[in-house]
Structures are given as structure tokens and as C-alpha cells.
């Protein structure tokens, strides 16, 4: 791989490393943010608990079945040693390095030079970020998917080269790290070989490589298959229904996709069709591009099957059992990838036009990142925390930031002033309590278990704790119900929103207290310590006042 700079070509080795640095920088441009990212508190917290069960030892979600054991083995020990924040930075860097190397491998297989590889990476990141169909992403926080995807791209590069054995090995590793990310790509590779290399499919050599790939996938596949081994068929069906139609329809059910997202998906599909027609005319004999197109066609076929299932089987419990497998995930990753590499390979894309594309995408993303950093909150907070309703944009931004700051301060107070083994009742939508407070919580919307028994318990807790009055008016306005919850789910503290004083839980308000700073004394969040002696006369059943 060579990188053309100012009309001259650098050496192959130098060009490779220069290209690698630029692609890695593109990863940082698209993925750099304050931690935790949207899924980091979820994944890293569970990974830390796996290696240190005494950390948040009574947390309901952390004690549910482990679906990503290989990720915990490979990376889960890192937060146990260096802490969550450092593990987040380390994990992102590792994932981005792996993704950059795998992307270079794919682009070399497609005979793209250095600058075209960089352009393709920027286009890929941009298309997935702004034009996804089902909410997929490729550059962000560290989780199982972030380590699995690079091996899936490496496997795709091997498919493009016709190296089927190597492809199955790499895709087996990808599947072990994340059974769906790797598994769908494994299936796409098998379909591609069926279409283009049938004679090799059943040879002894190929069967051996295929068996090795499956064997490597088993550490990720077996735990996923055993998640529901103790649940009845009825419970599994009900849990699937909750998972698909209540918790994640925006990822799994086509009819629930936003109109804009559907339009983006249609645009990607039309773009691929145009590319496929042009490629068959201009590069009909290029076997590498042909294998790449057929591999991506597999992702389109899976999405089409998911679309049919969504139309025919939703909403039903039998449909949920099928739809829960993220049929649209590979479409969001691979269709943008083929469009990005295809566009970057066009002969007319030269010189100043190449530079203009790089500068344009980087400028656009840089402006978006500036707004993200100006916001000041983590991406997890931006997704889940309340926002100010002020009409003035600057006032709205400042108050929104203060809401988040008060949340973090309340969590830190709990971390520094309470025993390690307490359980806390927290607001419904937040997802970073354990990250900041290092304490167990009753339940929240984000932390959903993967096994049927855990899913049913999660749903029971969500419905019994966060009733409609609680959702609309908060804990303080529903003291009787909160006291009933304290009997049902023995927790020790309550973190309540305090945007507008609406009542009092009748327990000691320990934060903010007289010792807190003046800034914290008017906090949007308050902390109550449960007094069980005061609940002896409360009603047995929960109700809302």
C-alpha cells in the first residue's frame, strides 16, 4: 500500500503506517467522547463485577446470566485492575487499533492505495453514523461488539481474497467475542462461498477450516444457547416479547423504525444497487470486488428476511423469538462499507477532489464533535439524563449541564459516604449510577438481562417500581408507593429528582446536607436514607399518592 503525497509515492512500509495513523485518527475523530459512552457503563460494569463479585454484589443486573463470557475473559479483568475510566480509554484505543488494521487489510485486498483507504474509512464512518437503518454504530465506546467487529472485517478481507480457511478462523473469533456480530458475518461468508466457490465448499481442506471456525465460535455461542436452559418455553416466549416489542423495537422491528431511518436505509440500498450495476459493467472480471459484493449481498438478504418477519410475525410472541436476533445489524455495517470502498475506488477520484472529500468530512464531523464537547456531558448522559426546557439555547445548555453535574455529585456523595454493600433506588432512565457511585441499584431501563428469567424479573421490577405516577411526578410525590417498594425490594437509599419540590419521602434527607457546598445545596437530585422502623405501619400494597 502506497500513500501519494504531493505527487510522489512513499515506500510501501512507510505508506502503510502513515495510512494506519490517519485511519486511527479518523476513529478518534468519530469516536472520541467523555466517558462513559452509551453502552460502556453497561458492559464494563458487568465485566468488572464478573471478575470482582463483591463490587456492587447485590445489583440485580450484574447478577443475571453472563452472555458475553469471552469479552469478560479477554477484557473484563482490565477495569478490575485499572478502574472503569482508564479501562474505557484503554479499550477504545485497542478497538480502534484493531479496526484500523482490519480496515487496511480489507482495502489492500480491494487494491485501494493509501489516500483512497483513508477516504473510504471516513465515508464508512460517516455513512454508518448518519445514514444507519437500525441504530448500529462502529466507532464508539468499548464493549463486546467493539472487539468483535475488527475480526469480522478481517474475515471479510479474507473472503475478498478468496482465503476461505482464514476467513472462517477470523469469523469464528469474531463470533466468540459477540455471537451476533460474528455470527451474521460468518453466515454471509458461507453464502458467498456457496455462490462463488461451490467446488471448494465440501473439500476436506475447506471442511476442516470450517470446523475450526465453528470450534472457535463455540465459547461465544454456547453461553448464548444456554441462557434460557432453566426457563420454561412459556417464560422464554414472554421474555422475547418483552425484549423485542417493549425494550428494543427501535433496533429489531422494522415497523418501529423512524421514517428518516427507513429513508436512509432505502438510500443505502439504492446506492448499492447502482454500484452493483456499474461494477458488473466496468469490473465484471474482478474476482475480489465480486466476492466483496456477494458478501455484502448476504447482509441485504438477511435484512430482507428481517423485514418479512417484521411484516408477517409482528407483533406476536412467536415473531419475537425470531426478531430478537438483530436481522438489520449487518446491513448497517456492510452496505455503507461497500459504498465507501466503491466510491473511493472510482478512477476519477483524484487529486484535489480527494483532498476536498477528506477536508469536508473531517470539518463536518469536527463541528459535531465541538458541539459534543461543548455539551460537556458523557454520551450516556446525553442519551438518558433529563434536559432543561428553557427556551433560550444558552440557558438551556447551562441548566442541562447543571442537571448532569448535580447527578454526578450526588452519586459521588453516595460513593464516599455509604457502605459498599448498600442497594439504591434510582431514577428510571439514568444509566450511569453504578459507574459514578459504585453501588448496587434496584433496576433501571438500560440494564436489561439477556436470559429469560432475568428479563421477566426486570420487567416485573420496572412495572412495579416505575408506575405512571412515578414516571410523571417522581419519587417524592409518591412517598407511599416508594415505601412499599422498600419492603418489596429492600434498598437502603433513594436518589430522587428534585426539579420542583413535590413532597417528602418521610425519611432523612442525607444529601444535600449542611456540610455540602453551596453549589450542591440546591441540587436537582436529593438522597434519602431508608428508615425501616418508620415503615411498620405502612400498607402492604403499593399505591401512589
Image (tube, rainbow, N blue to C red):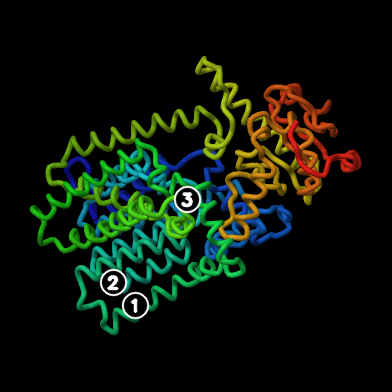
Quarter of the image holding residue 294? bottom left
Q: Are marks 3 and 2 in contact (CB under 8 Å)?
A: no
Q: Residue at x 23, y 69 (%)?
A: 162
Q: How crowded is the residue under tag 3: few (<14 C-alpha within 10 Å), some, or many (20+)?
A: some
Q: Position of residue 311 (x, y in %)?
A: 36, 50
Question: Are there few (<14), some (14-19), or many (20+) residues within 10 Å of tag 1?
Answer: some
Mark 2 sits on what residue? 164
Q: Residue at x 56, y 21 (%)?
A: 389
Dot 3 corresponds to which residue?
93
- Residue 293, percent from left and from top: 22, 57
Read off the residue under disc 1.
209
Q: Is residue 232 left or right of residue 340?
A: right
Instruction: Look at 33% across and 41% down and name the residue there.
Output: 262
Q: Could you say which is closer to the camera, residue 237 or residue 354?
A: 237
Q: Is residue 367 visible?
A: yes
Residue 387 position, x and y percent, is 56, 27
Q: CA distance from mark 3 to mark 2?
A: 29 Å
Amino acid at each position: 500500500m502506497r500513500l501519494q503525497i504531493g505527487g510522489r509515492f512513499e515506500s510501501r512500509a512507510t505508506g502503510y503506517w502513515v495510512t494506519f495513523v490517519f485511519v486511527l485518527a479518523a476513529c478518534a475523530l468519530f469516536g472520541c467522547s467523555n466517558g462513559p459512552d452509551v453502552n460502556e457503563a453497561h458492559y464494563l460494569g458487568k465485566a468488572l463485577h464478573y471478575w470482582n463479585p463483591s463490587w456492587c454484589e447485590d445489583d440485580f443486573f450484574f447478577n443475571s446470566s453472563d452472555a458475553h463470557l469471552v469479552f469478560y475473559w479477554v477484557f473484563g479483568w482490565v477495569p478490575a485492575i485499572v478502574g472503569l475510566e482508564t479501562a474505557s480509554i484503554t479499550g477504545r484505543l485497542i478497538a480502534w487499533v484493531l479496526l484500523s488494521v482490519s480496515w487496511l487489510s480489507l482495502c489492500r485486498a480491494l487494491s485501494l492505495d493509501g489516500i483512497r483507504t483513508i477516504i473510504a474509512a471516513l465515508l464508512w464512518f460517516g455513512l454508518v453514523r448518519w445514514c444507519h437503518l437500525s441504530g448500529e454504530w462502529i466507532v464508539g465506546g468499548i464493549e463486546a461488539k467493539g472487539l468483535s467487529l475488527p475480526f469480522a472485517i478481517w474475515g471479510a478481507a479474507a473472503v475478498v481474497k478468496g482465503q476461505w480457511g482464514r476467513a472462517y478462523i477470523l469469523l469464528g473469533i469474531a463470533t466468540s467475542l459477540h455471537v451476533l456480530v460474528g455470527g451474521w458475518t460468518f453466515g454471509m461468508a458461507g453464502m458467498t462461498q456457496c455462490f462463488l466457490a461451490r467446488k471448494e465448499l465440501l473439500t476436506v481442506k475447506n471442511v476442516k477450516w470450517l470446523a475450526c471456525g465453528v470450534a472457535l465460535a463455540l465459547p461465544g455461542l454456547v453461553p448464548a444457547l444456554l441462557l434460557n436452559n432453566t426457563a420454561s418455553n412459556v417464560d422464554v416466549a414472554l421474555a422475547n416479547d418483552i425484549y423485542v416489542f417493549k425494550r428494543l423495537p427501535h433496533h429489531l422491528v422494522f415497523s418501529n423504525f423512524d421514517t428518516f431511518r427507513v429513508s436512509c436505509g432505502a438510500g443505502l440500498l439504492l446506492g448499492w444497487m447502482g454500484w452493483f450495476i456499474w461494477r458488473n459493467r466496468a469490473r465484471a472480471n474482478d474476482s475480489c470486488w465480486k466476492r466483496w459484493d456477494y458478501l455484502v449481498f448476504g447482509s441485504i438478504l438477511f435484512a430482507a428476511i428481517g423485514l418479512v418477519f417484521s411484516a408477517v410475525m409482528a407483533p406476536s410472541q412467536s415473531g419475537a423469538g425470531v426478531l430478537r436476533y438483530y436481522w438489520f445489524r449487518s446491513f448497517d455495517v456492510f452496505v455503507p462499507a461497500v459504498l465507501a470502498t466503491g466510491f473511493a475506488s472510482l478512477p476519477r477520484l483524484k487529486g484535489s477532489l480527494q483532498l476536498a472529500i477528506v477536508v469536508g468530512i473531517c470539518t463536518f464531523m469536527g463541528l459535531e464533535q465541538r458541539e459534543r464537547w461543548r455539551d460537556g456531558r458523557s454520551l450516556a448522559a446525553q442519551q438518558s439524563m433529563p434536559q432543561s426546557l428553557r427556551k433560550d439555547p444558552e440557558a438551556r445548555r447551562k441548566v442541562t449541564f447543571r442537571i448532569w453535574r448535580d447527578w454526578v455529585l450526588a452519586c459521588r456523595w453516595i460513593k464516599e459516604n455509604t457502605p459498599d454493600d448498600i442497594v439504591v433506588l434510582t431514577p428510571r432512565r439514568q444509566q450511569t449510577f453504578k459507574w459514578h457511585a459504585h453501588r448496587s441499584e434496584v433496576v433501571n431501563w438500560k440494564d436489561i438481562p439477556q436470559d429469560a428469567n432475568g428479563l421477566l424479573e426486570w420487567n416485573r421490577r420496572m412495572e412495579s417500581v416505575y408506575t405512571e405516577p412515578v414516571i410523571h411526578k417522581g419519587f417524592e410525590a409518591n412517598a407511599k408507593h416508594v415505601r412499599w417498594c422498600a419492603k418489596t425490594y429492600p434498598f437502603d437509599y433513594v436518589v430522587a429528582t428534585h426539579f420542583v419540590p413535590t413532597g417528602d419521602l418521610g425519611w432523612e434527607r442525607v444529601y444535600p446536607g449542611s456540610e455540602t457546598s453551596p453549589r450542591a445545596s440546591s441540587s436537582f437530585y436529593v438522597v434519602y436514607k431508608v428508615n425501616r422502623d418508620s415503615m411498620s405501619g405502612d400498607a402492604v400494597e403499593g399505591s401512589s399518592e
